[in-house]
Amino acid sequence: MAAAGVISRAAAAAPVGFAGWTTGGNPSVDANLGLPPPSWQVPGNASYFWRDDHTAHTGFAFKMMSQGLADFFFGCSAAGAGEMFRIDTRANGNWAGFATTNSWKSWNAPASGFYAPPNTWIAVTLTLRAGEASARCTWAGGAATVTLKGYKPSGTAYGFQGDGLGATSFTWVSGFQALG
């Protein structure tokens, strides 16, 4: 049995790989990509998957590769209202950073952050402390850290959202861990 919050290769419930998660849209498992494979694949058509293990985690770690952008929701209510950390590879004023969420299908865009490289695996370590969330991102040839001051969780739900670039824009998530 996999540890809580870790991708389970032996998950038997449909869709395979999402046992214990609630899904919307059409996220899937990519058997060939990941560090190591498999990985979760999320299309940019507002597909999502989330869970609430009713634990106030102190952080999350995962690797993400995107053709455009995708969001990791955290500190959310069961309806998806809370905070998110976005990886955005479009540049030109489209930031990788923090923003608020309204639901699993409604969110805002970061007002600041950094430009993430496209089609590159980015290791993300999200650390949550009283009043602050920090995301440390590293990739081959680069690194960035962004901080959200005034963080106040709305709940203990967390998950991934493919955002809204369309069904032909994909993001992959590998090695997910809920920490603490």
Image (cartoon, rainbow, N blue to C red):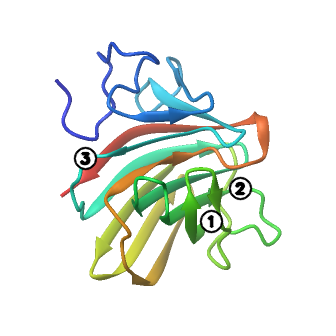
Q: Earlier in the sequence, mark 2 or mark 1?
A: 2
- Front one among 41 and 100: 100
Residue 130, located in which quarter of the rendered image?
Answer: bottom left
Residue placed under numbered mark 2 in the picture: 89
Decide: is 166 above or below 20. below
Please give the name of the residue rendered at 29% of the width and 15% of the height, measured from the top-left corner: 10
Residue 150, located in which quarter of the rendered image?
Answer: bottom left
Category of crowding for the residue at label 1, using alpha-carbon neighbours closer than 10 angstroms: few (below 14), some (14–19), many (at least 20) = many
**Quarter of the figure with the N terminus:** top left
> x, y percentage for residue 46?
67, 43
Q: Amino acid at mark 1?
A: Ala
**Quarter of the figure with the C terminus:** bottom left
Please give the name of the residue rendered at 23% of the width and 53% of the height, measured from the top-left corner: 54
What secondary structure is found at the residue carrying circle 3? loop
The residues bearing labels 2 and 3 have C-alpha atoms spaced at a distance of: 30 Å
| Mark number, residue 53 | 3
Give left or right: position of 139 versus 108: left
Q: Amino acid at mark 3?
A: Asp
Q: Earlier in the sequence, mark 1 or mark 3?
A: 3
Residue placed under numbered mark 1 in the picture: 96
> x, y percentage for residue 83?
48, 67
Residue 119, located in which quarter of the rendered image?
Answer: top right
- Front one among 69 and 124: 69
Please give the name of the residue rendered at 29% of the width and 37% of the height, measured from the top-left corner: 6
Answer whether residue 147 is visible to the viewer in this image.
Answer: yes
What secondary structure is found at the residue carrying circle 2? loop
Asked if the residue at tag 3 contacts the one at tag 2, i.e. Cβ–Cβ closer than 8 Å, the answer is no
Asked if the residue at tag 1 contacts the one at tag 2, i.e. Cβ–Cβ closer than 8 Å, the answer is yes
| Mark number, residue 136 | none
